[in-house]
Image (tube, grey):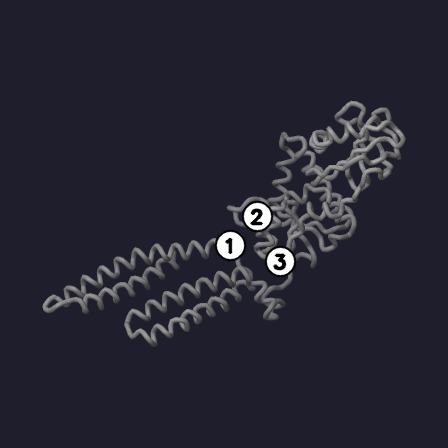
């Protein structure tokens, strides 16, 4: 409101002066002074309405550019001050030709309004790009000191906690910097773990167990109580917090990953990474798998590969509980929970037609 009212005030002054001059020029004696007063009042009223509309439009546009930013670290304060001052000076310089060539008392309020708008935009731009500006100026050690988290730490959202690939990266030593888990993320995962949806509940419980397992293995898992703007969703809150801390965000949401990249943030999409690293199992490849339970269709048995991918073997229900069963791959299917491999016993009766024709439906059922 301060920006809007200030912008409106400057335009009202400009409108009053313009109305005064118009009244002076069009007025005829002896009513010149009356015409000047009428012109000044009309000019101020018109400028008051236009100034309010333009001021709110400008303010709304700049607020959209910095939505969600509530706290400003020293780096952003410094950058906002410098860029804001630069914008103010740029507005004054841009208004010099108007003052030089248009000799009127309306020039100064118009130039002041232009400088005010550019200065305010500069402040908000400095808030958004504060860290980059400070790093470019070589002042990051003073104004952007390292956080209390180890170098290379990552911030995870609920989707990353519930994904098995996070634990895989941790066990492989690829999260040496540690994992930062916001408190609101833990609350969200615990809430999902109590939900009536058995699939989501199982994944949430597995995610909580994976965090404890990573912590027990020596990986630093830090739980932070820092909060992000309340108006954001859980994933967006994690993104805002990661940008505030200067850390990489780890997520399984393609939409959130795209949003982070559009904001210039550092993000790791676990789902895309796991898809790129998923082993390719061409038809005919032979695998050795432990069959642990019956499948959803008659005669099927289910096992798992070391990386966690599900293997559905036709005509193998009688081998449930057996280890190191050799199977031949018929086809694979990507699901939201990972890769499903359809196979048959090596040398056994072919069930390729059944697997291929029913693969899509069974993939959806087994994925759950």
Disc 2 crowd rating (10 Å Cα; few below 14, some 14-19, many 20+) is: some
Circles 2 and 1, Cβ within 8 Å, touching? The answer is no
The residue that disc 3 covers is 246
Label 1's element? loop
Disc 3 crowd rating (10 Å Cα; few below 14, some 14-19, many 20+) is: some
The residue that disc 1 covers is 70
For this rendering, which residue is in front, 142 or 164? 164
Q: Position of residue 26 (x, y in %)?
A: 17, 67
Quarter of the image where one finds residue 108: bottom left
Gap between marks 1 and 3, in whole Å? 15 Å
Residue plotted at (77% across, 27% down): 354
In the depicted structure, whether residue 239 falls above or below residue 294: below
Gap between marks 2 and 1, in whole Å? 14 Å
The residue that disc 2 covers is 236
Q: Position of residue 328 (x, y in %)?
A: 85, 35
Residue plotted at (18% across, 61% down): 38
| Residue at the extreme front of the image, as rendered | 353
Gap between marks 2 and 3, in whole Å? 15 Å
Among the two numbered marks 2 and 1 on one chain, the one whose residue lies closer to the N terminus: 1
The quadrant of the picture occupied by the N terminus is: bottom left
């Amino acid at each position: 409101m301060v920006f809007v009212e200030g912008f409106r005030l400057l335009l009202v002054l400009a409108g009053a002066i313009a109305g005064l001059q118009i009244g002076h020029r069009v007025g005829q004696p002896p009513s010149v002074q009356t015409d000047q007063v009428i012109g000044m009042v009309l000019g101020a009223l018109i400028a008051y309405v236009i100034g309010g509309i333009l001021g709110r439009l400008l303010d709304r546009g700049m607020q959209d550019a910095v939505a969600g930013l509530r706290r400003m670290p020293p780096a952003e304060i410094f950058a906002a001050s410098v860029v804001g001052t630069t914008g103010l000076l740029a507005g004054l310089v841009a208004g010099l030709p108007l003052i030089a060539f248009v000799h009127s008392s309306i020039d100064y309020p118009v130039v002041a309004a232009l400088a005010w708008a550019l200065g305010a935009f500069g402040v908000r731009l400095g808030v958004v790009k504060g860290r980059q500006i400070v790093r470019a100026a070589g002042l990051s050690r003073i104004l952007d000191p390292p956080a209390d988290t180890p170098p290379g730490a990552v911030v995870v959202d609920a989707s990353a906690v519930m994904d098995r690939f996070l634990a895989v990266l941790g066990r492989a030593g690829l999260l040496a910097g540690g994992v930062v888990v916001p408190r609101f993320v833990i609350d969200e995962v615990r809430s999902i773990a109590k939900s009536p949806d058995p699939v989501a509940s199982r994944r949430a419980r597995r995610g909580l167990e994976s965090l404890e397992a990573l912590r027990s293995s020596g990986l630093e898992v830090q739980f932070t109580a820092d909060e992000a703007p309340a108006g954001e969703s859980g994933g967006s809150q994690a993104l805002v917090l990661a940008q505030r801390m200067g850390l990489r965000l780890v997520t399984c949401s393609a939409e959130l990953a795209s949003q982070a990249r559009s904001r210039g943030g550092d993000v790791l999409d676990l789902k895309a990474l796991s898809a790129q690293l998923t082993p390719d199992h061409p038809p005919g490849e032979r695998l050795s798998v432990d069959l642990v339970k019956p499948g959803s269709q008659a005669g099927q048995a289910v096992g798992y590969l070391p990386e966690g991918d599900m293997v559905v073997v036709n005509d193998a229900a009688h081998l449930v509980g057996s280890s190191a069963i050799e199977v031949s791959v018929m086809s694979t299917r990507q699901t939201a929970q990972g890769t499903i491999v359809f196979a048959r016993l090596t040398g056994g009766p072919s069930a390729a037609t059944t697997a291929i024709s029913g693969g899509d439906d069974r993939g959806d059922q087994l994925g759950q």
